[in-house]
Amino acid sequence: MGKAQTINKVFRLKRGGKFNIPGLRDELEFINGQEFHIVLDVLYMNGFPLPMAMQTPIINWIFNNKFLFVEDTRNF
């Protein structure tokens, strides 16, 4: 088993809208301020992990389009 690349990161979408994400067939719609929480390379939204088939495409989309997001990682 490999080492996780992303241990704990939270990204908040600056502006909502419909997005075409490479690797996914359908356009996805997100709201303003939508949070994307990546823990040990697993993407969570609203407290739940996304389906496996959506994990890599959306994580790659986030990291390739950081200008769309505010990094909002908090350490407690």
Image (cartoon, grey):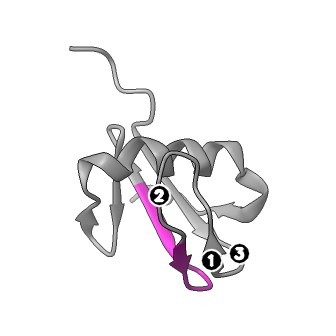
Most frequent secondary structure within the magenta stretch: strand
Q: What residue type is labelled 2?
A: Arg
Please determine whether, in this image, residue 27 is positioned above or below residue 50: below
From mark 1 to mark 2, how far is it between C-alphas? 13 Å
Q: Where is residue 10 in the image (x, y as percent from the top left)?
A: 50, 58
Which tag is nearer the camera, tag 1 or tag 3?
A: 1
Where 8 sits versus 27, above or below? above
* Mark 2 neighbour density, 10 Å: few (under 14) some (14–19) many (20 or more): few
**Residue at horizontal 27%, vertical 70%?**
47
Based on the displayed image, in which of its 4 quarters is residue 5 positioned?
Answer: top left
Magenta residues span 28-37
Amino acid at dot 3: Lys
Residue highlighted by disc 3: 14
Q: Mark 1 is on which residue type? A: Lys
Residue lying at the far right in this picture: please name it: 67
Q: In which quarter of the image is residue 70?
A: bottom right
Tag 3, which secondary structure?
loop
Task: Check disc 1 and report the residue beneath it.
Answer: 18
The label on residue 25 is 2
